[in-house]
Amino acid sequence: MPPVDLVSLFLYFLMLAFLAIGGAPSVLPEMHRYVVELNGWMTSAQFAELYTLAQVAPGPNVMYVPLIGWQIAGWAGAAATTLSMLAPSGTLTLLVAHLQARHPRATLGIAIRRGLTPITIGLIFASGWILLPAVNDDWRGYALTAATVALVLRTSVNPLWLLAAGAAAGIFGLV
Amino acid sequence: MTSALEFATMNVHSDKAGSPEPGELFVAFSRLTLHSFGGALFWSRRMMVEQRRWLTDQEFAELIALAQLLPGANGVNLAVIVGYRFAGLRGAAAAMAGFVGAPLAIVIGLGVLYQNLGALPLVRDALTGMGAVAVALLIATAAKLSGVLQGRWRPWTFALLAFAGVGVMRWPLAAVVAVLAPFAIALAWKGRL
């Protein structure tokens, strides 16, 4: 494994934070490209497993970021990725929350939001696309994914039960 | 449509249930985040609008839009906005700490377990099954969100281009967004997206 330069790791995740319009999943493809394809710090399967672990835990979906950082460079890596992902964008949010109280309906803000919405949606689909072959070994995995998508879209079942069902399916050798 | 002035006043006088203190914000957001399996949005609305009555549905929708417009993690942004609104800087810090603290500890704990037990066949099998579900949750979220595009071809074109560029071609995100975003924002500005 190549050595990890913590400063560039920090700066890279800083850039990711500012590209994460629409939430943490929209930068997953870029993080995958950097961590797996460019630097080879982990395999695509490991990346997908860490993402899955974060989904099993409660909390915001950004929590896959500290896990990825931790796998790359231990505690320092977790700190470098998490701080850069949360602190600067949190500060920007504070600033905007302050301004927004004064100018609640700025037209430019609305245009930016409307314009970025479809791009964000495309990026979340891209995240799913990249993870699909990383988590699924054969057609049975894809079938489980497809069935789960249909279930989530048609019912309001708690995702926790679905994850538990997925774990059971894995343990009993169904996927 | 509420005028800008009315909306601004509405923002200031939203003390339906009294404005929560930083300590209360910390506890409320810790509880919220520990409920949030598979995304915090559902639980956020339940807590802020239905249970604690901090916000009306309209206010909640506005704040969500703002949180999504800003870069960074949506849920964390929402915690910062709501915390700041009720208790200023200290409120924002308390809400963010409450929202992120416990999940961070849990997820690192899971990471340690994964490093030690990740090679066990039982754990590998369980992770394989859960992985298939976790990806499904991601795809389903994108599918649900795509309802706001209302089947119109211009927004769908941008969604497809972003998907193809980043997902299929694996081009750098910054480049894809730098090319697509100006066109999309300009079209939205002219009301044609």
Image (cartoon, rainbow, N blue to C red):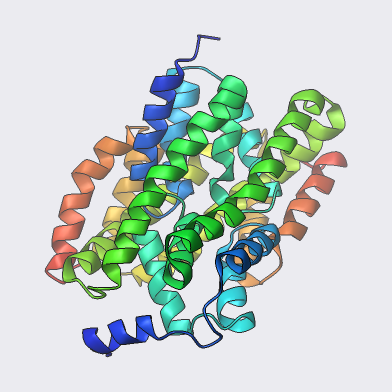
The N terminus of chain A appears in which quarter of the rendering? top right
Residue toward you, A72 or A86: A86
Q: Please tell me which residue is depicted at 36% across the width and 81% down the height of the picture.
A: B11
Residue B128 in the image: above or below residue A154: above
In the picture shown, does residue B103 fall above or below A66?
Answer: below
Asked where in the image residue B149 lies, by quadrant, the reply is bottom left
Q: Which residue is nearer to you in this view: A120 or B140? A: A120
Q: Residue furthest top?
A: A2
> Quick check: can you spot residue A125?
no
Residue B192 at what x, y percent from top left? Answer: 16, 69
State the image coordinates of residue B25 (x, y, percent, origin top left): 58, 66
Q: Residue at x 38, y 29 (%)?
A: A12
Q: Total marks drawn?
A: 0
B24 vs B120, left or right, is: left
Judge left or right: residue A124 versus residue A170.
Answer: left
Along the line of sight, the residue nearer the viewer: A119 or A108: A108
